[in-house]
Image (cartoon, rainbow, N blue to C red):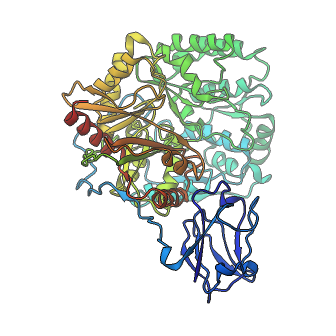
Amino acid sequence: MGYMTLSAQTTVPSTNGALTIPMNDESVSIVFDPKGSAMFDDEGIRGASDGLTVNLGEIDFGNNAYNTVSVEMANVMKPSSDNGFEFYAENMLIKPKTDFIIGQEIPHLDSYESDLQPQSGLFFKNNNLPIEDISVYDLRNDDSYGKITACVAQGILNQENAEVYLVLENHHQTQFEDIYGPEGGTWHLLWTDFSPQKYSGLATLINDNKDKFSKFVLWDPEKEWTWCIAQMICAQQKGLPVTAEIKEFLNTELNLNLECEDITNKWSNKIEAYQWAIDNLADGCHKYLSFSAGLRSDYISNPWKIYDYAAASKGFVFFLKNSIPEESEMITKICQKMNYQPGASTMGYGAEDDGDGLNNATNPYNVGFMVSDYYANGSFWCSFPNKSFQQRKGRAVKAEPGKIYVSLIWSDGDNIQFDANQMYNMFKSAQGRGEVPVGYTMASSLQELNPKLLEFFYQNLTPNDELLAGPSGFQFIYGDKYNAENYGKWLELNRKWLETAGFHTACLWNTTDKERFGEYMRTCGLQGVFDGFDNNKERYEMGNNGEGIVCVLQGTHCWNEGDVFNDLIKIAPDGTKPIFHNVYLIAANYGGTDGYQRLIRELQKLESYQPNTFEFLLPMDLCATLKNYIENNQQ
């Protein structure tokens, strides 16, 4: 009886081709198939798993009778041990070990609700609780201009009470039903067949609320900055931002005929436009919120959703590149005019290719980042009362020499659009969630911005889930860039917001200054910090609360299946001491509803190659284990 398996030493990955054995399922069986790829068809059995092991029945490999076995794989010739295949006699075969080790599973606290007073005062809130009868408008068939116009209109309608909710994508409806529906009032999904259909949802929304808008504000898509200024004028004067085509449509279909303020040629360039806004609109803007919320180059195919919250809050709206001197200078002028204090946020996303780089321009003026470009219905979700939460604290396991202790973290939860979209869909629908310990980065600001969404995550936590802060705590900042005089005030806000969000670990980026990093560790009140810039490996500090806190490297960014295995298999066990390691899973690419299945396949493969070596812990448990090890071994 013969067996065939793809060798662990092969240099040709199985995904480049397929193993084909022309035999039927009566004479062939699958011993090991990590990807679940093997199947029988008219030509035999096929499979593309790396490590696939097949029982080949009665084939006698000793007489070189290979005519009954064919192999199809890129760059692989006749199968032999030299080109990536190994042959075993029955008594030599050992089924690979694939059950990876979970360091510990601890039941949750009886309640995720905290007695602590939730944080507040940094974000716009309309009157608590939505009105009883919510109008839910279907915008899924509208084009981009219809959607962004409707978002601004929604924000204006929701400035005092949460009356309007928009379904811009399918999951917005299921999210509304999941989170609001069970305990909310009545609601109706509204859509009327106006022509052209690309403005039907917008027309339905406006037709139901004709008397609530004072005027049109005409802007020009060829002059992107006019969209930003139009948003601010409309927010403060209950106007409706329109293109020439939408204005004509609303007048024709709805006989709206509002007075029109035309700003299409009011300024010769964006610098003049923003200076006018500073002089004429800034005094009426929100004192803690600004919005980098213009029209990015992809707005036709994928329009942003943050515009409703910008309009509801009356925050200052801009879209400027800090790499261009005159535009960077204008960002400075806006911040100085508004005199933002620690805790102030810019929402949306930066205008550069690296939108995160907006921190370079705003952090020196006390403004942190709250990435949120595709965050929808913010003016509705903010209406619920602020709420604080709690999780159990991390608990240590005994760290043994020769073992590698690993935590895994999903990325991008500091970005509240990820929390509301990608993370929400994963938590709701991902198969395999709860089978391996993984931390979810999450925005602690949700306790004020969207307490219902944060509660959704807490309600659905498994013992193998942890919520932790993404970069860099309660806001995304570049620690090296933040205003030096007010960094201490920011750290105090950070401690409070993380505590009442229930978080015990956080990621910290762009803080290469050792003292600033240490100050963060000592003041944050957490059990551990994950350094995204490889500057602090297994660092230990005594916190101001009298408890030790550790830092671990955040680790490799894993974008695609195979990255986790490739990162971990390179770590050699040390017989003299344990090793502590973290892996950073990129939610946008590695994640999704099949992200856990992808991860589990990788961990099973890892265990088959290096059995009984890796133990997987939640981030807070890894930090507690490292802390105990350092303290007990005086390292």
Tell me if residue 595 comes above or below residue 329 in the rendering: below
- Residue drawn where x is 49% and y is 63% of the image: 431
| Depth check, front residue: 627 or 254 | 627
- Residue drawn where x is 67% and y is 61% of the image: 82
Q: How many marks?
A: 0
Q: Quadrant of residue 69?
A: bottom right
Q: Quadrant of residue 247?
A: top right
Tell me if residue 489 comes above or below residue 609 in the rendering: above
Q: Is residue 369 left or right of residue 626?
A: right
Q: Position of residue 556 (x, y in %)?
A: 52, 39
Q: Is residue 123 visible?
A: yes
Which residue is at the far bottom? 26
Q: Is residue 163 visible?
A: no
Q: Is residue 331 left or right of residue 75?
A: left
- Residue drawn where x is 62% and y is 30% of the image: 293
| Depth check, front residue: 360 or 535 | 535
Q: Is residue 103 left or right of residue 160?
A: left
Q: Position of residue 371 (x, y in %)?
A: 53, 33
The image quadrant where one finds the N terminus is bottom right
- Residue drawn where x is 69% and y is 81% of the image: 63
| Depth check, front residue: 46 or 511 | 46
Q: Position of residue 456 (x, y in %)?
A: 40, 53
Q: Position of residue 125 (x, y in %)?
A: 42, 35
The image quadrant where one finds the C terminus is top left
Tell me if residue 476 comes above or below residue 455 in the rendering: above
Q: Is residue 527 left or right of residue 342?
A: left
